Amino acid sequence: MARPRTPSRVLELRGSFAHDPARGRARAGEPVPTTPLGDPPSRLDAQERAAWAEISATCCPGVLTGADRLVLELASRLLAESWDVGREFKDSRRRQLHMLLGSFGMNPSDRSRVTAVQPKPPSRLAMALA
């Protein structure tokens, strides 16, 4: 299996773009998700919604965005299924759930590979106008 691509934010913090500016220019148009995660889709049943709530509450702040909704839906369905069937949960499904949760940084080794968008504090002007 190929090694996953290092996130641009990690390369930037390491100084990789300063060392190799062409590498930074190649990633200049990379999309940055800005939409919030939002509520679970109505198509999820009650148990899957509970799984959505648990995953989104447990995940580190700033990791999940609106761009992650479909992947979170799949992870929620798998987690709810694992709760339903318990020990009968197939190993292939367990590996898939583990991989999905890892992509959200929800285990110690994968957490070191995930970067979160840090919210900017409001400016004094914005606070004064509010």
Image (cartoon, helix red, strand yellow):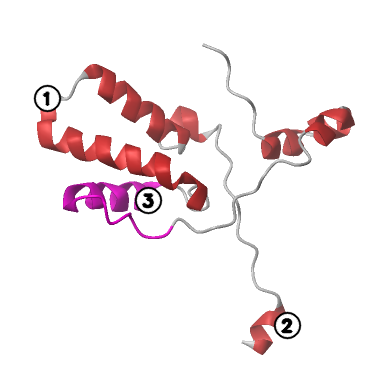
Report x, y in % for residue 127. 65, 83
Q: Residues within 10 Å of mark 2 (few under 14, many from 20)?
A: few
Report x, y in % for residue 122. 65, 73
How far is mark 3 from mark 1, CA to CA?
24 Å
Residue range in magenta is: 38-59
- Within the magenta stretch, is there residue 14? no
Which residue was labeled with disc 2? 125
How far is mark 3 from mark 2, CA to CA?
32 Å
How far is mark 2 from mark 1, CA to CA?
56 Å
The amino acid on which the numbered mark 1 sits, given as a three-letter code, is Arg
Question: Considering only order in the chain, which callout, 1 or 2, is on the residue closer to the N terminus?
Answer: 1
Q: Could one spot residue 107 in this view of the protein?
A: no
Viewer-closest of 74 and 43:
43
Q: Which residue extends farthest top?
A: 1
Question: Considering only order in the chain, which callout, 1 or 3, is on the residue closer to the N terminus?
Answer: 3
Q: Is residue 36 left or right of residue 15?
A: left
Which residue was labeled with disc 1? 87
The quadrant the C terminus occupies is: bottom right
- Within the magenta stretch, is there residue 56? yes
Report x, y in % for residue 36. 50, 59
Up/down of 108 relative to 32, above or below: above
Instruction: Name the residue rendered at 11%, 31% in the picture.
Output: 85
Q: Which mark is residue 56?
A: 3
